[in-house]
Image (cartoon, rainbow, N blue to C red):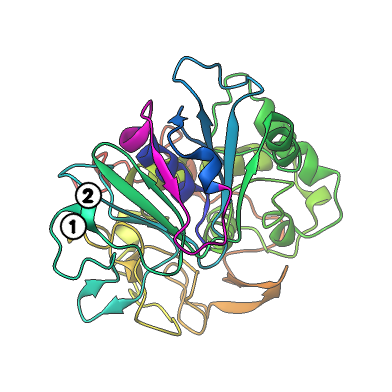
Amino acid sequence: MPEGHTVHRLAAAFERAFGGQRVRTSSPQGRFSEAAQLDQMVLLGAEAVGKHLFLPLAPTEDVDPGAPVVRHVHIHLGLYGSWTFAGEPGFADAHAIGAPRLRRGEQEEELDAAGVTDWRRLVPRPTVRLRIAGARGLADLTGPTACEILDADGRRAVLERLGPDPLRPDPVGRERRRFIEAVRRSRTTIGALLMNQKVVAGIGNIYRAELLFRARLDPLVPGKDLSTGMLAQMWEDLVALMTYGARTGRIVTTQPEHRELEARIVERSRGTRQNGDEDPDVVPREESFYVYHRQTLPCRLCGTTVRSADLAARTVFWCPRCQSRRRRRASWTRENPAAPWALASETADGKAA
C-alpha cells in the first residue's frame, strides 16, 4: 500500500499538471459514473492527508475551495491503486505514482499506447476507474479502494477520522501534541499504534519498522510506557523521513555509512518497483532499510538476526538486541540534532554529495 509520502507527491503532481485548469473527466471502466458530473469543471488544486487524496473541482476557478458548490473527489489507493500520467514533456514530472508496478522485462506497465505518440489519442485500459485530462496531459486511476464525490461536510468527516499527518504544516506543534497524547493514553503496543491511522496518518509498514529501529524501541512496548520526550523525538524523526520521501519518491532510512553493511533484503518477489527506481543514482532498495524485509539476515549494526512477526494485521520487523524496551535513541542519531536521521551528506535529490 502506498505510504503517506507517495500521496503527497501525488497531490503535488496534480497541482503541477491540472491546477486551475478546466478538465475533462470520464470513467472508462464505468464504475465511477459520477465522473460525468465533474466534466468540464475546474480543478482548484489537490490535497493530501495521510493516505487520502482530495481533488476539489468547481464550476469556475474563482470559487472558494470551501464553498458548497465545490465537489471533492476523494481517493484512497489502497493496496493496488495507482495513477498513471501521460502528456507533453515535463507534464506532471511523473509517469506513475501509487502501488508498485509490475515489471515486464525492463519496462514498466504503461498506458495502452499501441504505438501512439500523441497522448491525446491514448486509449484507456478497461480497468481505468477515472480519467482526468487537461491541456497538456492526462492521468488514469486504476484499482483504488475508494473513489467517490464528497461535499465539504463529507470531506470534513473523513479528516475527523484521521490522526495528525507528519507532512502537513504544524507551526505551533498541535499535530505533534495530538500524536503524543494519543500514544500515551493507550495500553496498545507502539507497533500497533503506529499503524492506526487515527493515531498518526500516513505511516505504513516500512515507516513503522524503520522508525522503531531508529528509536531503538521494541514494537511491543505499550504506548503509555513511553515518555513525552521520546515520542517528540520519534515525531520529529518521522517528519524528516517522510519529508525526504515526499521530495525524492523513496523511503531511505539508513545512514550513508551503514548502507554497504549487510546490503541484502528478503522479498517474496523481485518483480516490483518503487517510485523513483527509474533513477540510476538513487540508494538501492537493499541498502535503504535497517530491518524492513530483512528477517533472517544479520542486523547492520550488531549482527543479531532480524526477526519478524504478525502485529496489527501486518508483518513487523525488528532487531531484538538493538530494540530494547527502554533504551533511548542511539548516539549516532543524537549527535547531529539538525539532521537526526542523517542524510546530511546527500543532496536535496537524495543522491550522495
Type of amino acid at the residue the image marks with label 2: Lys
Type of secondary structure dominating the magenta stretch = loop
- Callout 1 environment at 10 Å: few (<14), some (14 to 19), or many (20+)? few
Residue 97 image point, x, y percent: 38, 55
Q: On screen, 56 above or below 209? A: above
Instruction: Give the residue drawn at x 19%, y 71%.
Output: 114
Residue 86 visible in this rendered orientation of the protein: yes
Give the SS element for disc 1.
Answer: loop
Instruction: Give the residue drawn at x 45%, y 51%.
Output: 26
Quadrant into which the C terminus falls: top left
Q: Between residues 125 and 263, which one lies in front from this camera angle?
A: 125
Give the SS element for disc 2.
Answer: loop
Q: Is residue 297 left or right of residue 205?
A: left
Residue 183 image point, x, y percent: 77, 46
Residue 185 image point, x, y percent: 86, 44
- Callout 2 environment at 10 Å: few (<14), some (14 to 19), or many (20+)? some
Residue 140 picture quarter: bottom left
Residue 29 forms part of the magenta stretch: yes
Instruction: Give the residue drawn at x 76%, y 60%.
Output: 221
Residue 201 forms part of the magenta stretch: no
Residue holding disc 1: 281
Q: Between residues 278 and 33, which one lies in front from this camera angle?
A: 33
Disc 1 + disc 2, Cβ < 8 Å: yes
Residue 68 image point, x, y percent: 67, 23
Residue 259 picture quarter: bottom left
**Span of residues in magenta:** 16-34
Q: Between residues 105 and 19, which one lies in front from this camera angle?
A: 19
Q: On screen, 46 above or below 257? A: above
Type of amino acid at the residue the image marks with label 1: Asp
Instruction: Give the residue drawn at x 35%, y 35%.
Output: 18
Q: On screen, 74 above or below 300? A: above
Residue holding disc 2: 351
